[in-house]
Amino acid sequence: DEWTGEVDEAAAAAIGEALHSTVPGVLEELAKL
């Protein structure tokens, strides 16, 4: 929370999962370079 500085655990977990799911696509695109 930007007002209290407390971490929203559900949001943090969702962001982590979203970023984790992008890794295969990023690696695939980098392999094309």
Image (cartoon, rainbow, N blue to C red):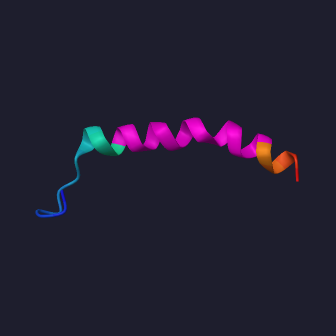
Q: Which residue corresponds to the image point at 69% horizontal and 37% vertical from the top-left?
A: 24
Please tell me whether residue 14 is drawn above or below residue 4 in the rendered image.
above
Q: Which residue corresponds to the image point at 75% horizontal and 44% vertical from the top-left?
A: 27
Magenta stretch contains residue 26: yes
User: Which stretch is magenta?
Assistant: 13-28
Q: Position of residue 22 (x, y in %)?
A: 60, 40
Q: Is residue 15 left or right of residue 20?
A: left
Which corner quadrant holds the N terminus?
A: bottom left
Magenta stretch contains residue 4: no
Q: Position of residue 13 (x, y in %)?
A: 36, 39
Residue 5, by quadrant, is bottom left
Q: Which residue corresponds to the image point at 56% horizontal and 35% vertical from the top-left?
A: 21
Q: Is residue 32 left or right of residue 5?
A: right
Q: Which residue corresponds to the image point at 78% horizontal and 40% vertical from the top-left?
A: 28
Residue 3, by quadrant, is bottom left
What is the magenta segment's predominant secondary structure? helix
Q: Position of residue 2 (x, y in %)?
A: 19, 63
Q: Position of residue 4 (x, y in %)?
A: 11, 62
Total marks placed: 0
